[in-house]
Amino acid sequence: MPNMPKLLLSTLLVVMLLPVSGAAQAASPAGSAVAPSGAQAAEHPAFHPFQMPKLDPLLNTQPPVTDDWLTFSHDPQRTGWNNGETTLSPSNASNLKLLWSTQLPLTPSPFAAQTLTAPVVVADVQTADGAKTVAYTISGDSTLYAIDADTGKILWQKAFPDANAPVHDANWMCTDTEQATPVIDKEKGVIYFTTNDGDLRAASLADGSPKLTPTVIEPPYVRSWSLNLVDDVVYTSMGRGCGGEAVHSMVSGNVVAADVHDPDHITVNHVYTGASRPAGPWNRGGPVLGPEGVYVQTADGRYDPASGFFAESVVAIRLGGQGIDDSFTPSNWRYMNAHDLDLGAGSPILFVFHGQALIATGAKESIEYLLDANELGGFDHNTPLYASPKLGNDPDMLEQYGIWGGAATWQNANGDRYIYVPMWNAPSKNAPAFSHTNGDVSQGSIMAFQVIENDDKFSLQPAWISGVNQAPDSPAVANGVVFAVGSGEQTMQNPGHKIIRDRYAAAKLRNTPVGHQILYAFDAETGKQLFSSQDSLTSWDHFSQPVIAHGKVFVVSYDGHVSAFGLK
């Protein structure tokens, strides 16, 4: 039903995708919805398809200006741009030094490549020792850490072990570990996070004391993704079919909206993008805020919107989890499915350029798209505003190549808008020529593009490409400097194109790095390398990003270190 009018399709999907009540659960794809216990069922208002209010096309598009880093990629729009940072600049980035590196008291999982979430950082936390800038991260065993951002001292830690054993044996894809980056509400002095038992929790920034009645919002041991916070509603997403319970052993991909206005009575909605493992949203940035609600990016699988299946898609979920509003699916989704080039490996970002809300995203296939955030794929849901030439992954591999993670974006004082794309392995032979090429780009790179509008048509103009040592994570940018981490991780999954059936052998391959982390700083307009950490970092990381806040750059590693770079 690809040409179904958007309004009619949205109306149908609201009815299909309400998962909280028993009746709605039965209506979800393949009858696989999981209603979280302990959460109050939301009462959905009547839907009037011909009385929908006209939305502001720039609603929820302006990130707050702050030097705090309160959520994954800095802000609810996931721009990766710390727009409040003034200490670090192109003129002094070459003077960066490793200020401290703290080993947290943990043991990495033999199955999980990610030991710690990307940090979140906030200033003016009123602790027993006075006001401090504090970095927070949560480990795979569901321990929340608060670390003094100036000294690296652990201020406090709170463990939330799950007494129940997982229903599935862990493997490298379903690791039975926590991985969702928390989100901070600075005004309330609260950090929200999820734990392996499926609970949403909240803790005081100052001392870790509980600030919310723990509420189940997801089955245990799922792979949930970075939390977002919009008007006292916490959002997360889950994909990969991991975790579950005896009665629901395969968790369907969905987006969670948990209303935390009343911290003692949490209301939870789920919106499903598919059934079982396929079509689940697993973009590492989690839900992204914009004018149509929150946006997620899904894995391969079945594409049948009339039946509630949205594989290989960017999907807009109405705020509050009130159903699906819109979607974009590349027209070659069948080819992407056949070659496991799913969009879920990437992660969208949202920004405004020339008065229009845009989404930039790409994934394994290495095509970067610009989408209208108010009309994701046009009338047919398959038409982007712009699709780049192939930028990488000439072999069309499901591993080792392509765009993994989200881009970052920045605008200079002249109004020139750039996006910065992480590329694994070498550029495509058909990639466009860049104005500046810096260093060896054969193992990985950051590609920079300037956003252009001519005659109401948008495009990406190649600006520069700069090499990193191996498999760059999602980049970040502040005050004219792009920061990127070459992760050093092993990106091969299936040696010789053969699946390793033994879960221990497969995990050992994935968790044996090919190098170590290197933090880079590049000039945001030319790509000139301003700094490299060289051998300062000795471990590696997976699905993380550098975090810029209050004159420092923070990174985490597989071996449980949190490290901070800054100016001495």
Image (spheres, rainbow, N blue to C red):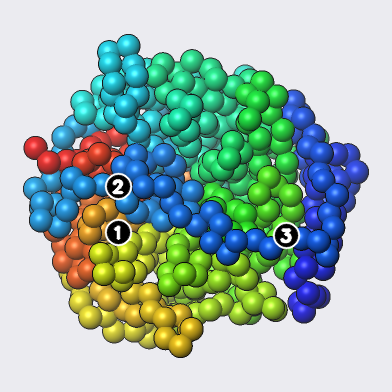
Q: Is residue 267 visible?
A: yes
Q: Amino acid at mark 1?
A: Gln
At a point 72% along the width and 60% down the height, the residue shown is: 53
Q: Amino acid at mark 2?
A: Gly
The x, y position of residue 232, in whole percent, is: 59, 36
- Looking at the rendered structure, the secondary structure element under dot 1 is loop
Which mark is drawn over residue 253? Answer: none
Which mark is drawn over residue 470? Answer: 1
| Mark 3 neighbour density, 10 Å: few (under 14) some (14–19) many (20 or more) | few
Q: Nearer the viewer, residue 553 or 555?
A: 553
Q: Disc 3 or disc 2, which is closer to the eye? A: 3
The x, y position of residue 189, in whole percent, is: 45, 25
Q: Disc 3 or disc 1, which is closer to the eye? A: 3
- Looking at the rendered structure, the secondary structure element under dot 2 is loop
The x, y position of residue 386, in whole percent, is: 50, 80
Return the disc, 3 or 1, that comes first in the chain's sequence: 3
For disc 3, the marked residue is: 53
The answer to whether residue 204 is above or below residue 521 is above
Return the disc, 3 or 2, that comes first in the chain's sequence: 3
Return the disc, 1 or 2, that comes first in the chain's sequence: 2
Q: How many circles with numbers are drawn on the protein? A: 3
Q: Amino acid at mark 3?
A: Pro
